[in-house]
């Protein structure tokens, strides 16, 4: 064979080798083996292919060059991957990169983690009521930034399945009532609820295989949009879920904006409809609602011998205790790879009073400081939450805006002279503390 023919034969062998090498690399990248084993496999495969293609050359050199080329190509093409899937990695404290987001957004994420770990005094009663055969509804009551929204979102997610136990099979739907506005009507509420039900993962999966139920929901949405939805439409809809053994639980955020709306109060039939639907047998609907005030406070116009919302069990968003703080602080410190300080939990409790927003902010700052070898004393931590436009100031403004006139008078009386409080004012402040409505710094 002439030199030219030999050269073209050698080029042809290299072309075939390149095709085989491409197939090998594709197989390696898609293989679930550890990264180091993939790189080794890619190198051996490339070395063998190029070594065979380079007949007539030094086989050892070709094999060695192929190994290096294969391993390098794999390393360049294959993205690095963690040892565990991202969802299994421990939560990490927020890095400096998230500083561009509002502090409220960052703290909401950290409060959600707190709820998953330590808020058993709130989560357990809600879940226990949903596990009852009667599928009992609840109202979770707490002031601004007490964790209501985070709790409802968590309860609506698959992460709550373990806590719910046998109630995990319910179709849980998060509904944000704040989008309705002050002039909303009951048909608009039900339209919003039905839309969220249709879009929720559990609801969508069920509706995909249940044609009759899908048709009933579509009819309810059409009638709600036209303002013609009535109790019989709602009974047909939720009875359909009940017959399948998949009752619906609406996790409604800011439900007090609904009950304070005159369009929902008597003589309107909204709360009678809610009570009727929640008491039907078999159960097809329950509510877990978040409210800044007990429904009895904002629904006085609907009160009577048997208020239509009396089937809602009241569960206050109680402040954190020191054990809660210690558990969360230890979890975040472990995720950051640093040891927690023994005295830090007590300090966080003294400065925050167990308020979730303030406690979460302080714990996050402490863990960040430990991660960089710094120590924050009590004075430094106090400055972190009392800085202008910081957590304490924003929380204080939000709480004061939510208080009634008599409650504001009690707060002002304590601020002027705690010893001058009347028994009635002290009782008011104690009730505010129960529902996380006591401004920071007031201790009764």
Image (cartoon, rainbow, N blue to C red):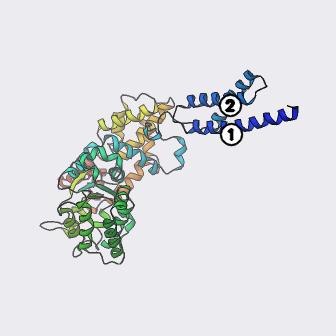
Marks 1 and 2, the one that precedes in the sequence: 1
Q: Nearer the viewer, residue 8 or 288?
A: 8
Q: Nearer the viewer, residue 93 or 56?
A: 56
- Identify the residue at horizontal 58%, vertical 38% (top origin): 27
Give the x, y percent position of residue 389.
Answer: 46, 51
- Identify the residue at horizontal 76%, vertical 27% (top origin): 55
Q: Residue furthest left?
A: 305
Q: Nearer the viewer, residue 161 or 289?
A: 161
Give the x, y percent position of residue 159.
Answer: 35, 46
Q: Which residue is mark 1?
A: 19
Residue 441 visible to an observer of this rendering: no
Q: Is residue 365 left or right of residue 187?
A: right
Q: Nearer the viewer, residue 398 or 337?
A: 337
Disc 1 to disc 2, how far (Cα)?
10 Å
Tell me if residue 18 comes above or below residue 406 in the rendering: above
Circle 2 sits in a helix, a strand or a loop, which is it?
Answer: helix
- Identify the residue at horizontal 48%, vertical 36% (top origin): 368
Tell me if residue 339 comes above or below residue 152 in the rendering: above
Q: Which residue is mark 2?
A: 49
Circle 1 sits in a helix, a strand or a loop, which is it?
Answer: helix
Residue 96 visible to an observer of this rendering: yes
């Amino acid at each position: 064979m002439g030199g030219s023919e030999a050269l073209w034969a050698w080029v042809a062998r290299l072309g075939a080798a390149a095709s085989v090498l491409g197939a090998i690399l594709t197989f390696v990248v898609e293989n679930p083996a550890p990264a180091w084993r993939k790189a080794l496999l890619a190198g051996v495969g490339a070395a063998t292919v190029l070594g065979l293609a380079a007949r007539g050359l030094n086989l050892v050199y070709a094999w060695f060059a192929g190994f290096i080329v294969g391993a390098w190509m794999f390393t360049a093409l294959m993205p690095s991957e963690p040892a565990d899937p991202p969802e299994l990695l421990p939560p990490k404290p927020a890095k400096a990169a998230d500083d561009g987001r509002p502090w409220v957004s960052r703290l909401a994420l950290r409060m959600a983690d707190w709820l998953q770990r330590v808020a058993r005094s709130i989560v357990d009663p809600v879940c226990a009521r949903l596990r009852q055969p009667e599928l009992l509804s609840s109202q979770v009551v707490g002031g601004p930034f007490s964790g209501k929204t985070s709790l409802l979102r968590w309860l609506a997610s698959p992460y709550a399945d373990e806590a719910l136990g046998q109630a995990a099979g319910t179709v849980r739907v998060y509904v944000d009532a704040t989008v309705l506005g002050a002039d909303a009507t009951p048909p608009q509420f039900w339209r919003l609820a039905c839309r969220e039900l249709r879009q929720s993962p559990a609801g969508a999966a069920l509706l995909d295989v249940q044609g009759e139920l899908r048709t009933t929901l579509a009819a309810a949405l059409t009638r709600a949009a036209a303002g013609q939805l009535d109790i019989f439409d709602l009974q047909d809809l939720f009875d359909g879920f009940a017959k399948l053994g998949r009752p619906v639980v609406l996790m409604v955020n800011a439900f007090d904006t609904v009950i304070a709306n005159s369009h929902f109060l008597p003589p309107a039939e909204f709360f009678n409809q809610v009570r009727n639907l929640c008491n039907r047998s078999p159960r097809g609907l329950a509510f877990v609602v978040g409210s800044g005030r007990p429904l009895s406070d904002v629904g006085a116009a609907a009160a009577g011998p048997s208020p239509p919302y009396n089937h809602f069990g009241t569960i206050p968003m109680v402040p954190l205790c020191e054990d809660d703080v210690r558990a969360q602080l230890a979890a975040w410190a472990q995720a950051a790879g640093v040891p927690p300080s023994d005295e830090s939990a007590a300090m966080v409790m003294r400065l925050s009073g167990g308020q979730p927003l303030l406690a979460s902010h302080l714990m996050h700052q402490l863990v960040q400081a430990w991660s960089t070898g710094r120590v924050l004393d009590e004075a430094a931590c106090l400055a972190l939450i009392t800085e202008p436009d910081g957590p304490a100031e924003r929380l204080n403004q939000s709480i004061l805006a939510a208080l009634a006139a008599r409650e504001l008078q009690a707060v002002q009386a304590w601020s002027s002279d705690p010893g001058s409080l009347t028994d009635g004012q002290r009782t008011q402040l104690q009730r505010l503390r129960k529902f996380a409505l006591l401004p920071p710094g007031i201790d009764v």
